[in-house]
Amino acid sequence: MEMVKTAHAVDLHVHTTASDGTLSPRAVVKLARERKLYGVAITDHDTVDGVVEAQRAGVEFSVRVIAGVELSATDESRDVHLLGYGIDLLDALFREKLSALRSERDERIKKMVERAQACGMTIAMDDVLRESSGGTVGRPHLARAMVKRQLVSSVQEAFALHLRRGGTCFVDRPQLAVKNAVQWIHDAGGVAVLAHPALIGDDAYVESYLHLGMDGIEVDHPDNDAAKRATYRAIAMRMNLFTTAGSDFHGLTSGHRGDLGSQIMEYEDLPAKLRT
């Protein structure tokens, strides 16, 4: 990937093998260096376990690494994701809450595997755990396991037929209220940002979630088209929120979201507390 980078370009939405990414935290930071990025935020799903390794790699490769997390909240039938930045990694209570979320995630995936088995699919939880490599388990791992078992031809097909809401194997995620997720991030010393708002599907809901105490909104994201980006920038200006950019990178071969560095912003445009 060839991109023109500014001196202090940062990608604020990056996943690693600590959740459903395919590259280790160190490998992600090394790639960021190769892509001439000034910094990245590690934002794995419901875990901060990859951040320390990434920060050590950041020292090695001269890349700024921001401690982050992506929390999966729910409002009725809507999935609402929040990015938390500047998290205090020593906050024991926050880590306990994340651990409980991951346990609930494990139970969810077990139920989805059971539904797959009930549909005649030859797949086991061990297949999914092998894909997760010890990280937080999620639907992408189940999708990859289905591909390896030749039950589907691609991760995209697995989601389309079986793992999306309404699919044959879908089970609702653990119920974490949006307002509570915002509070968790703030209590852990972080700032809360509404992730990929276009995926929510209704901008009236986007504004209602922002009014729950969020600090920012992810404007530049692969799922936000030009019109949506303009809308979200206008909302951010009106509500005095900061805007972020992130590729939602999951790996070079994941087939999921954007490539590392494809959505960037200036480090200097971050809130002061994140410019450490």
Image (spheres, rainbow, N blue to C red):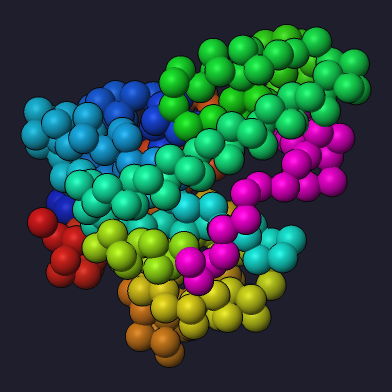
Residue 264 x, y percent position in the rendering = 33, 54
Residue in front for this viewpoint, 249 or 274: 274
Q: Residue at the location (35% across, 85% down)?
A: 240
Residue 97 in the image: x percent, y percent?
Answer: 42, 49
Depicted 137 relative to depicted 96: above or below: above
Q: Which one is in front, 89 or 107?
A: 107
Q: Is residue 158 magenta?
A: yes
- The picture places residue 198, in percent across and down from the top left corner, at 61, 64
Residue 129 position, x and y percent, is 56, 18
Q: Quadrant of the C terminus?
A: bottom left
97 relative position to 225: left or right: left
Please state the total of marks drawn on the protein image: 0
Query: Is residue 97 visible to the viewer in this orientation of the structure?
Result: yes
Q: Which residues are magenta?
A: 156-180
Quarter the N terminus occupies: top left
Relative to 62, does residue 212 appear above or below in the rendering? below
- Does the stretch in magenta take in 133? no
Q: What residue do we see at 63% from left, 13% from top?
A: 127
Residue in the picture at 39% in, 62% down: 184
In this picture, residue 23 sits left or right of residue 119: left
